[in-house]
Structures are given as C-alpha cells and as structure tokens.
Image (cartoon, rainbow, N blue to C red):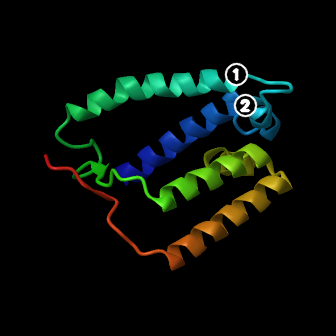
C-alpha cells in the first residue's frame, strides 16, 4: 500500500512538473528541435534542472543500503550498445521530434482530453505490446548487491 501511495504521489508531482514546464505542449517541443526556425531553448532549462536533481539524488541513493519502499535497488546490468538500442533511440527521437509528444507527457496530457494524445498513447501502447510479444525477455535490471 505504501508503494502504491508513493507511486501516485510521485506520478502526480511528475505530471504537474511536466505540465508547468510545457512538456505537454507539442508545439513547444517542436520549436525546441527547430534550430533553423523559431527555436525555443526553454526545454533545455527543464533538462538541465532534471540533470541537477539527478546529480543530487543519485549519489544519495548510492549511500543507502536499500530503497525506502523495496527490498533492493533495481540496477541495469547491460552496458553494451547494440543495434536494438540504437534503433530504439533513433525511433524515439524521430517520433518525439515529429510529433512533439513524449511518452511521459503523453500520459499526463490524457487528462486534457485532446484526441491526438489518445491516438499517440494508443499507438505507443500497441507498439509496446508488439515489442513485448516479439522480443526475447531478458534480465536488463537485477537487484543490486547490498
């Protein structure tokens, strides 16, 4: 129950942050990647803010023996760069640049009731389902040793 409440609170804070920063506005995202037109650098400030928070938070987690609401940290074990990673990153970047919609903000934006967000979310869910059915399941994250 604690984990569910924590997840809801974190999701709410994340969604509010995405909305306040304008990440749910596809036009803002498209202007960010339009270097030759009406470039809007404000998204860079959002990214820098996220990097600062990560830079503060990650070292704090490294000092902990275990998370507050779990038995162990889930740490990625793979470090290789393979064609699937490159292809997935390219597909994500092209889709984000063309549509102006990212997975996290698309979920947040569903609350606005705009049809394009529902279409994007449905396509994203379908793509995830197809990937899950066609790819080998592998342990990309394992509990960290305490």
- State the SS at label 2: loop
Question: Left of 116 or right of it: where is 126?
Answer: left
Image coordinates for residue 118, horizontal then vertical, percent: 77, 59
Identify the residue under disc 1: 42
* Disc marking residue 12: none
Few, some or many C-alpha atoms within 10 Å of disc 2 (few <14, some 14-19, many ≥20)? Answer: some
Q: Name which of mark 2 and mark 1 comes first in the sequence.
A: 2
**Residue 124 in picture, x, y percent from top left:** 66, 62
Are the two marked residues, 2 and 1, in contact with CB atoms closer than 8 angstroms? yes
Front-most of 19 and 84? 84
Residue with the most extreme bottom position: 133
117 sits left or right of 126 in the view: right
Residue 22 got which mark?
A: 2
Q: Residue at x 51, y 28 (%)?
A: 50
Residue sitting at x 73%, y 52%: 110
Residue found at x 78% / y 47% = 98
Total residue callouts = 2
Select label 2 or label 1 by which is in front.
1
Q: Secondary structure at mark 1?
A: helix
Crowd band around label 1 with a 10 angstrom C-alpha radius: few (<14), some (14–19), many (20+): some
């Amino acid at each position: 129950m604690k984990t569910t409440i924590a997840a809801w609170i974190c999701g709410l804070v994340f969604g509010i942050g995405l909305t306040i920063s304008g990440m749910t506005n596809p036009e803002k995202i498209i202007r960010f990647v339009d270097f030759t037109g009406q470039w809007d650098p404000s998204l860079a400030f959002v990214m820098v803010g996220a990097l600062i928070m990560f830079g503060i938070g990650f070292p704090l987690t490294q000092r902990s023996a275990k998370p507050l609401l779990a038995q162990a940290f889930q740490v990625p074990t793979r470090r290789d760069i393979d064609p699937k990673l490159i292809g997935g990153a390219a597909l994500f970047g092209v889709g984000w640049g063309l549509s102006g919609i990212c997975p996290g903000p698309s979920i947040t934006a569903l609350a606005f009731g705009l049809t394009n967000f529902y279409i994007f979310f449905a396509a994203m869910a379908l793509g995830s389902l197809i990937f899950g059915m066609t790819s080998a399941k592998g342990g990309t994250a394992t509990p960290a040793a305490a």
